[in-house]
Image (cartoon, rainbow, N blue to C red):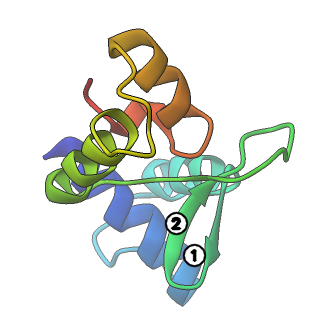
Amino acid sequence: MAETKAYNEVFNYLRDNEYPIDFSKDQKRNLRKKAIKYVLEDGALFFIGQRKGEPKRWVHCQDEQQKILKACHSDKLAGHFGRDKTREKVCTKFNATCLEL
C-alpha cells in the first residue's frame, strides 16, 4: 500500500508538475527530492538514481510484478533460474525495491 501511494505521488508530480493539495511545505520538499531520482517515459515511471545510469522501471502493481517474475524465472526462454539469479536478472531492468522476491 505504501509503495503504491509513493508511486502515485511521484508519478503525478512528474506528470502534472503539481503537488498534492494537502501537502505541507516539508512534504513538498521531500517529494521534490524523491522525484529527482525518477523520469516518466511512455507513461511509465523509471528509477534513474543519482548516477543517471540505465533507467529501471518502477513496477508497483502486484499483478505486473508476478508476470515479470514468472517471465524471468519460468518462461522457456528464461532458463529457469533459481531465486538469486532471477532476482539479479529482474534487478537489471526493474526497480528492485518494488519487487518482493
Q: State whether residue 14 is above or below residue 99.
A: below
Residue 12: which quarter of the image? Answer: bottom left
Rate crowding at label 1 as few (under 14), some (14 to 19) or many (20 or more) other CA atoms within 10 Å.
some
**Relative horizontal placement of residue 77, taking residue 41 as reference (left or right):** left
Separation of marks 2 and 1 at Cα, in angstroms: 9 Å
- As rendered, which of 42 and 38 lies closer to the eye? 42
Residue occupying image coordinates x 58% and y 83%: 17
Q: Mark 1 — residue?
A: 14
Residue occupying image coordinates x 72% and y 41%: 49
Rate crowding at label 2 as few (under 14), some (14 to 19) or many (20 or more) other CA atoms within 10 Å.
many
Q: Amino acid at mark 2?
A: Leu
Label of residue 65 in the image: none
Q: Mark 2 — residue?
A: 45
**Relative horizontal placement of residue 89, taking residue 21 as reference (left or right):** right
- As rendered, which of 20 and 52 lies closer to the eye? 52
Q: Position of residue 72 (x, y in %)?
A: 39, 40
Q: Position of residue 71 (x, y in %)?
A: 33, 48
Residue that protrudes farthest toward the front in the picture: 76
Q: Quadrant of the C terminus?
A: top left
The local secondary structure at tag 2 comes to strand
Q: State whether residue 79 is above or below residue 22.
A: above
Q: Amino acid at mark 1?
A: Leu
Contact check, label 2 and label 1, Cβ < 8 Å:
yes
**Relative horizontal placement of residue 77, taking residue 98 as reference (left or right):** right
Q: Position of residue 100 (x, y in %)?
A: 25, 29
In the image, which is nearer the foreground, mark 2 or mark 1? 2
Q: Position of residue 1 (x, y in %)?
A: 13, 46
Residue occupying image coordinates x 46% and y 53%: 58
Residue occupying image coordinates x 71% and y 49%: 48
